[in-house]
Image (cartoon, helix red, strand yellow):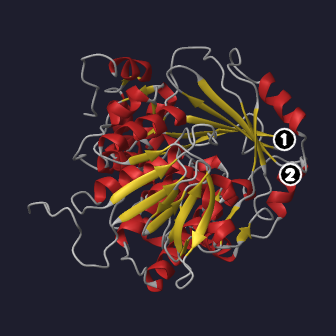
Amino acid sequence: MQANSDPKPDGADAIRSVVVAGGGTAGWMAATYLAARLEGQGVKITVIESSAIGTVGVGEATVPAIRDFFKAIGLHDFDVLRASNGTPKLGIDFAGWAGENTRFFHPFGLYGLSSRGVPFHQYWLKLAHAGRRRDLAEYSLCTEMARQGTFMLPVDNPVNELAVFDWAVHFDAARFAALLREVGQQRGIQLIDDVITHAVLDGQTGHIAQLETKAGLSVTGDLFIDCTGFRSMLLGETLDSKWVDWTGLLPCDRAVAMPCAAATAFDRPYTTSTAREAGWQWRIPLQHRVGNGYVYASSQLGDDEAAAVLRGSLEGEPLADPNFIRFGAGHRQSFWIGNCIGVGLAAGFLEPLESTAITLIQTALEKLVDLFPDRHCDPALAAEFNRATTLEYERIRDFIILHYHANRRHGQPLWDAMRAAPLPDKLAHKVALWRARGKLVRYEWEAFLDPSWLSMYAGFDMQPARHDPLADHFTKAQVEQALDHMREAIVAAAGHARPARDFVARLSGAAAPVRAA
């Protein structure tokens, strides 16, 4: 179908101008995505961003869906990796969460082969209940590559479930935002470098009519995207969307970040989350440095102590002073009010344990395009956006809570309290069904699917009382033989991967990256 060559959208009520308040990762993701999806419809997009105001850099790790965003705005994965000093990510390594000197991996991939409509993990459980326990991680190609420090690209049409895996990226958030800014301006997005002082509401509709700036500009628009960070200047301050506080469920409310030089060449294609006495520490390897941070509960640890713990655990020379970030887990009660949609930190925040900050930006934009309004902004569209986004936040919240609930760090106040705390109802139902018969439950707007939940249950050794009786179609000997063959196939497939450092080196060369066999 030929694109509309008319410079104006059809209909007098169509959205003709979108104003993005705030830049950084959220602002420029919003602007470039809308510019790409609304191309040819005559919609003017303006970003108001002050070069004098810094951004909160908590989004250096992602999940595989980010690569769909790259494609949507016309960027290749490798272009992003080159521009942002990025590296590939196969998942997250959890160190110390199941007790001191333990570790398990959350991969972006599947486990084993299902058979006769019965999930693989039920056969794995059948052997465990027979006293023949095996390490679930041995049946994940993604995990095997992470263990070996290797990487390859997935094939487009894998021969079976054993070859199914995905990958995400680590990147320098500031460089990524700069790349998006460049792409956006090439697409004709207008940039106003100024400070927003306040919003003016329309007296009749209650919608935002315009934004006033420090330089005396009045910027009008039909639709406003609030990307003003934790301040939530439009959605929170102007439109009074109340804050739903989840710090009682997720008590970590501080982070201190400090990059350092890498001790070795890139060889860990994954994020590392290491449990600490008052929270957890992240390690995100980039091409030019390692990102580090300590997420902690201020009720358990002071800022100076947290910075000292982080500094003492760095693998190389610090490259910046400690950067302290205060936050609270939760979200705005309404994410869309009138003609204003909150995106990123202006909408809510969940600690970056599973790298979901950028995911929530991306899904908000996808929902917005799916429900894109006209100038009247029918409340039914906002209601559905708010319903779906609330569910999405709750689902991610519950997945993060599971990490704390299932911990095995005994004798430490934070961890003991999290193990003993009651679970939200939906999460309690999930856990109960898993413990009863290894049943995996999937709700609407789940950000993490069955393999992710399985990696947590197995990583924390949450063994169900029974397995699915349909797994008894095969004898224990037959299941053991099948698992042996699966393990052999995993090892053979992983043999086609190459050192992850070689993949990164190829990004600047002419050689093609290796694909899975």
Observer-nearest of 356 and 108: 356
Q: Is residue 338 above or below residue 170?
A: below
Q: Which mark is residue 193?
A: none
x%, y% of residue 333? 65, 74
Observer-nearest of 16 and 2: 16
Residue projecting furthest to the front: 216
Look at the numbered discs 2 and 1 and tell me whether their residues touch, using CB distance below 8 Å: yes
User: In the rendered view, does 70 fall on the left or right side of 253?
Assistant: left
- Point out the tag, 2 or 1, that comes first from the N-terminus: 1
Give the SS element for disc 1.
loop
- Quarter assignment of residue 421: bottom right
- Residue type marked 2: Leu
Quadrant where the C terminus lies?
A: top left
x%, y% of residue 252? 78, 51
Using the rendered image of the protein, determine whether residue 478 is visible from the camera's viewpoint: yes
Name the residue at 90% across, 51% down.
299
| Disc 2: CA contacts within 10 A as few (<14), some (14-19) or many (>=20) | many
User: In the rendered view, does 29 fall on the left or right side of 291?
Assistant: left
x%, y% of residue 306? 84, 35
- Quarter assignment of residue 166: top left
| Disc 1: CA contacts within 10 A as few (<14), some (14-19) or many (>=20) | some
Q: Which mark is residue 277?
A: 1
Name the residue at 57% across, 47% down.
355
Give the SS element for disc 2.
helix
Q: Which mark is residue 414?
A: 2
Observer-nearest of 377 and 261: 377
Distance from the alpha carbon under mark 2 to that under mark 1: 7 Å
